[in-house]
């Protein structure tokens, strides 16, 4: 017979609370785990702010900007999720992806938040190739539609 599998008090990736035999107030731990899972599944944020919004709706998530203050102080780069009238903070892990609803752009975390900026469309030059410029413009449009670059 193998040894029983021993758990820490939280999951290793996102720190979701785990239950233990005989634990009191299990509903608080289960509810917190469900709230964090709810925020992380198909993650989407309203945008990026350094201070909490004045009247957030339940379920709103925001990317905490640098120099955060107020209830978000010390959580720069984390995802702030409004649950049960409180802010839950999820520190990002490599591979986390989010949809920024304010720009329609996908964000990716790999050491830092990776947010591609839109390159300028070609202008000027001594030789103008209209077919190449049309193709580049179409490519940039496709990348915007795919959420890689922000909408124009």
Image (tube, rainbow, N blue to C red):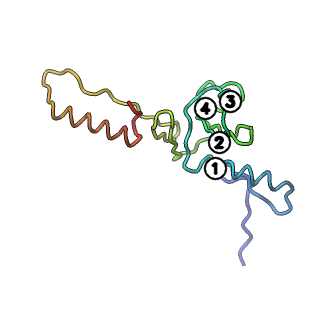
Which residue corresponds to mark 4?
64
Which residue corresponds to mark 2?
59
Name the foreground residue: 126 vs 35: 35
The answer for how far apart the CA atoms under marks 4 and 2 are is 15 Å
The answer for how far apart the CA atoms under marks 3 and 2 are is 12 Å
Which callout, 3 or 4, points to the residue nearer the camera? 3
Which callout, 1 or 2, points to the residue nearer the camera? 2
Q: Check disc 1: other Cα within 10 Å, few if <14, some if 14-19, many if 20+.
A: some
Looking at the image, tell me whether mark 1 or mark 2 is earlier in sequence order.
1
The numbered mark at residue 55 is 3
Residue beneath the point at 42% across and 34% down: 116
Secondary structure at numbered mark 1: helix
The numbered mark at residue 68 is none
The answer to the question of whether label 1 and label 2 lie on touching residues, with beta carbons closer than 8 A, is yes
Q: Position of residue 121 (x, y in %)?
A: 28, 28
Name the foreground residue: 112 vs 78: 78
Which residue corresponds to mark 1?
38
Residue beneath the point at 14% across and 21% down: 126
Q: Quadrant of the C terminus?
A: top left
Relative to 36, 23 lies left or right:
right
Q: Position of residue 62 (x, y in %)?
A: 60, 35
């Amino acid at each position: 017979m193998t040894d029983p599998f021993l758990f820490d008090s939280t999951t290793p990736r996102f720190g979701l609370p785990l239950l233990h035999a005989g634990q009191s107030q299990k509903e608080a731990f289960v509810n917190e785990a469900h709230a964090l899972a709810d925020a992380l599944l198909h993650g989407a944020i309203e945008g990026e702010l350094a201070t909490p919004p004045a009247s957030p709706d339940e379920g709103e998530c925001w990317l905490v900007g640098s120099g955060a203050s107020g209830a978000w102080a010390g959580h720069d780069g984390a995802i702030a999720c409004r649950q049960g009238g409180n802010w839950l903070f999820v520190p990002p892990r490599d591979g986390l992806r989010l949809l920024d609803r304010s720009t329609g752009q996908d964000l990716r975390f790999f050491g830092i938040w990776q947010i591609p900026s839109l390159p300028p469309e070609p202008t000027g030059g001594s030789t103008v190739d209209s077919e190449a410029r049309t193709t580049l413009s179409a490519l940039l449009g496709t990348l915007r539609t795919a959420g890689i670059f922000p909408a124009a």
